[in-house]
Image (spheres, rainbow, N blue to C red):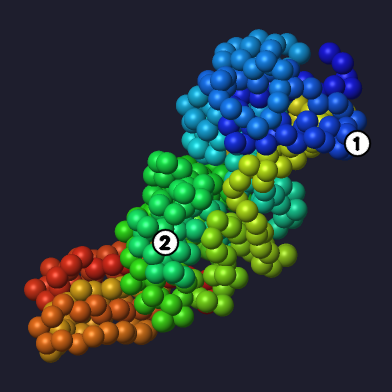
Amino acid sequence: MNKKIINLGIVGFGTVGMGVVKILQHSPAMFTEKTGLRPIIRKIVDIDKKRHRDVRIPAWILSKNVQDVLDDSEINVVIELTGNESAARKILLDALSRKKNVITANKSALAKYWDEIFAAARKNGVEVYYESAVCAGLPIIQVLQQGLAANRISRIFGIVNGTTNYILTRMDRDDYSFKDALVEAQKKGFAESNPTLDINGYDSLHKIVILSSLAFGKRVKIEDVYVEGIDKIEVSDIKNGAELGYVLKLLAIAKEEVNKEIEVRVHPTFLPKGHVLSSVEEEYNAVYIVGDLTGPIVLYGRGAGQMSAASAVIGDLIYLGRRFVSGMSGRVDNIWEEKHSDLKIKGINEIRAEYYLRFSVVDSPGVLAKISNILGMNDISIAQVIQKSRFSGSVVPVVMMTHEAVEKNVQRALKLIDHLDIVKAKTVLIRVIGVRS
């Protein structure tokens, strides 16, 4: 193999794959200047060879058969961009077993099969890179692995899904319903035709599993993380929160408390309007990290898009190329000791938070007293109350913001409250990040 060449096989030739090819075609000199290597695309694999693409490549480079990449002994880097979890897992493991380095954008495969993938890399003396799997152009993986390596990380708060942030922005700023905001996001290309993984929070879940594992130095299991999406959010709740001084975001949260307890969760969250993440709008992403030495830092930018994601892939490729040249490639970082147990994650019922509660009640004397009494019996104190219109006998919304309370106490209280005759619908609960969080 020519030591001045890096031979590439690309599997998946959709939006990001085309972006990668564009960069390599338009800026090969840049790559060579930064690595000393000339990048050669030997094969591109995609199911649909006939689809129109806005890049020109020789017909012989395109294939429908992934074995054309895996069986080519000259290819030393496989760039996996399929977007399919099970296919990605197989491609990654097969490539690693053939001693090929891999770069992947598949967050779900990494979150679920991390141990298996990195064990294969160590066994075969090759490497795995995945900057584009989390927030695309935001270099969050490098920041955690290198820039903040000297720090103990206590907080990660992330707006890591552009689809949901765009939807919530439209609901907040323009009074769109959830459905209308989703349709607009799809028309503008910010949401998939099937947006389930985004709106149900699972895309954010996969990302925070990866980030929290890196931050805390132990494996976070995906099944231990609470996840809740935005599909039940109503404009009225966003407006009520704004009146109280808060902005609603789908937040990915990872926290390590002084007592070493770990929280990792994804759910809609009210942030104080003064919080740095509260101004992140539309399809933008941002990650707020607190290190014991650096204090808080923020990464902000487009978390999706062709060139943003492709930039992250090429960044990984440049870093890997430099390791080839320096003779360092194949030395896989042991991010956490395998002898260590997985992290024990605090269950959602055990967390402490402030809460936004919206009750749908009959407007009659004594309603607030009954609700307040049940909350008090469960060690929940009220910080603020909003009661809008008052028409005798009608159903009205009553909004309460609580002081910090234990989730299981709140859930127990709501179960009792929702069984009262005066309550006509299930109470809406949204967790709140307080000023001191």
Q: Nearer the viewer, residue 308 or 246?
A: 308
In which image quadrant can residue 377 be found?
bottom left
- Considering only order in the chain, which callout, 1 or 2, is on the residue closer to the N terminus? 1
Left or right of 46: which side holds 376? left
Q: Tell me which residue sits at (27%, 85%) in the image.
A: 387
Q: Which tag is nearer the camera, tag 2 or tag 1?
A: 1
The label on residue 33 is 1
Please tell me whether mark 2 sits on a helix, a strand or a loop. strand
Q: Label 1 is placed on what type of residue?
A: Glu
Residue type marked 2: Pro
Residue at the location (88% across, 34% down)? 29
**Where in the figure is residue 105, as x and y percent of width and height?**
60, 36
Q: Quadrant of residue 385?
A: bottom left
Q: Is residue 285 above or below residue 363?
A: above
Is 364 on the left or on the right of 52, as rendered?
left
Residue at the image point whose x is 15% and y is 84% from the top: 363
Q: Position of residue 431 (x, y in %)?
A: 39, 67
Give the label on residue 268, or none.
2
- Find residue 90 and name its label: none
Rounded to the nearest angstrom, the CA distance separating label 2 from label 1 is 45 Å
**Badge 2, how many Cα within 10 Å: few under 14, some, many 20+?**
many
Asked whether, in this view, residue 74 is left or right of residue 205, the answer is: right
Point out the residue furthest to the bottom here.
Answer: 365
Q: Quadrant of the N terminus?
A: top right
Q: Secondary structure at mark 1?
A: helix
User: Is residue 129 among what the camera can see?
Assistant: no
**Image: 324 above or below 281:** above
Indicate the position of residue 9 as horizontal and vertical percent values: 69, 21
Q: Nearer the viewer, residue 206 or 167?
A: 167
Within 10 Å of disc 1 (Cα), the crowding (few <14, some 14-19, many 20+) is few
Residue 8 image offset from top left, x and y in percent: 73, 23
Choose between 362 and 126: the one closer to the eye.
362
